[in-house]
Image (spheres, coloured by chain):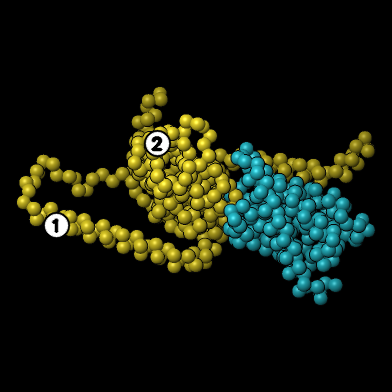
Amino acid sequence: MRNLFNFILRNSHWLVAILLVAFSFYLVFAHNSYQRSVYLTSANSVTGWFYTTTNNITSFFLLKKNNADLLERNAELEERFHTLRVFLDSLINTDSVVVEAFALDSVGIQHFDFIPAGVVNMSFSGVNNFITLDKGAAHGIKRDMGVISQQGVVGVVASVSPNFSVVIPIINPKFRLSARLRNSENYGSVSWDGSNIRRAQLQDLPKHEVFHEGDTVLTSFSRIFPKNTIIGFVSDTGKSVDDNFNTFNVQLATDFYTLQDVLVINDRFYDEQQTLEETLQQ
Amino acid sequence: MKISYLYEIVLFVLLILLQVLLLNRLSLFGIATPVLYLYFLLKLPIGRNLFYVIISGFLLGLIIDVFLNTPGMNAAATTIVAACRKPLLNLFFEKEEYDEFVPGIYTATGPFIRFTILMVLLHLTLLFFIESFTLFNLPATLLRIAASSVISILLIFAFDSFIFKRKRGEQV
């Protein structure tokens, strides 16, 4: 008996180690779902604050590039504004009959709101990539909202705290999104194989689908993103798992290395659609 | 004695900051990420209480996890490495060394290099396998382990020689 006690006493540090390792593995598995704990991620207010502060410093160095992007965008919009203006003038000057009954509703019903947010932290050194934003529940962000950048799709909000939120980006193996090529109606799904931050894979497109390098990849049926949001551009054919379907490599439109500002999409009719679809299941 | 604990706390915080703010944002060729924070476990005195080693290793990993959104992964790997530290130390260092002896690249070059290589390899192998648990392709994981290990080991040696070159005058 005494020997046994001695044995346990002598090796008790191993016991502690095993307990701690078990606890760590519990964390690994417990948090490997979409419902990640807010407390142990960077949506937590302490780490969130920490990242905001450091990001204030680092974002300074990216200002130049972002400025250039904005100017470019500005120029593009200016140009469109101009062409529309000219078009409108030409319409006014023609002597056509205006059918009053078919007047378009100029106000319309706005389907989507956009909440601008800043990126405070990003991890993309491994495969479990996340982005932390500086806005949260207090600003109207909820789980499962889509996130886009000026260039294209970024990801989906996974967890939210009052002032921060964590986004699962396209470049995370858990992310899946239904997508299609611009010139066709067949849809496949976009996912990421973990190899390259600038490249995702578009899978499950039928073999007969014609494609060209540089074709635009857009979102298709999605509860989260507006239809026809840009995801990226086809770069080449990739390895296919199934003979009946093609896989393409997609050059992502969003440059995650310099991502600074994003827009979170609020679908005003999300709840309505959700309730309607749920009535079917009952 | 007290000074050495204070020094360890500073090192602890410094390594976490370096890892989280700088090193984890590097991704050389998309595969290699330098992991420096293990340096803390390498530099504890040889005869340090085993509970202290294991628990501080666990805390180190956990804090890194909280910042990197990877709950448990670094904590698990670091705790296992901390538990295996003593047997590995016995493998490379003479038993006669006094308890407060701190291994370093200037104090015990050969053993320290071998000890570091083994510890880092063990740590990164665990880390990347836990990370890619169900995952994808084995060759890519092995490549990431190898590349990250090489870069981490070089970084640890550089860091060690950099810190102790300045302090050598006072310490010896």
Along the viewing direction, whichever of B109 and B51 lies nearer the viewer:
B109
Callout 1: few (<14), some (14-19), or many (20+) C-alpha neighbours within 10 Å?
Answer: few
Q: Secondary structure at mark 2?
A: loop
Along the viewing direction, whichever of A83 and A155 lies nearer the viewer:
A83
- State the quadrant of the C terminus of chain A: top left
Residues marked 1 and 2, same chain: yes
- Count of labels in the image: 2
Residue at 88% over, 59% down: B99
Q: Secondary structure at mark 1?
A: helix
Instruction: Look at the image and tell me whether residue B54 can be seen.
Output: no
Q: Colour of chain B?
A: cyan
Is there CB contact under 8 Å for labels 1 and 2? no
- State the quadrant of the N terminus of chain A: top right
Q: Amino acid at mark 2?
A: Glu
Q: Which chain is tinted yellow?
A: A
Write down the chain letter for disc 2.
A
Residue at 83% over, 51% down: B88
Instruction: Residue A218: give x, y in percent of width and height.
Output: 38, 44
Asked which quadrant contains residue B39, the reply is bottom right
Along the viewing direction, whichever of B57 and B2 lies nearer the viewer:
B57
Q: Amino acid at mark 1?
A: Asp
Which labelled disc corresponds to residue A209?
2
* Residue behind mark 1: A89
Mark closer to the observer (1, 2): 2
Left or right position of A112 against A7:
left
Marks 1 and 2, how far apart at CA: 41 Å
Callout 2: few (<14), some (14-19), or many (20+) C-alpha neighbours within 10 Å?
Answer: few
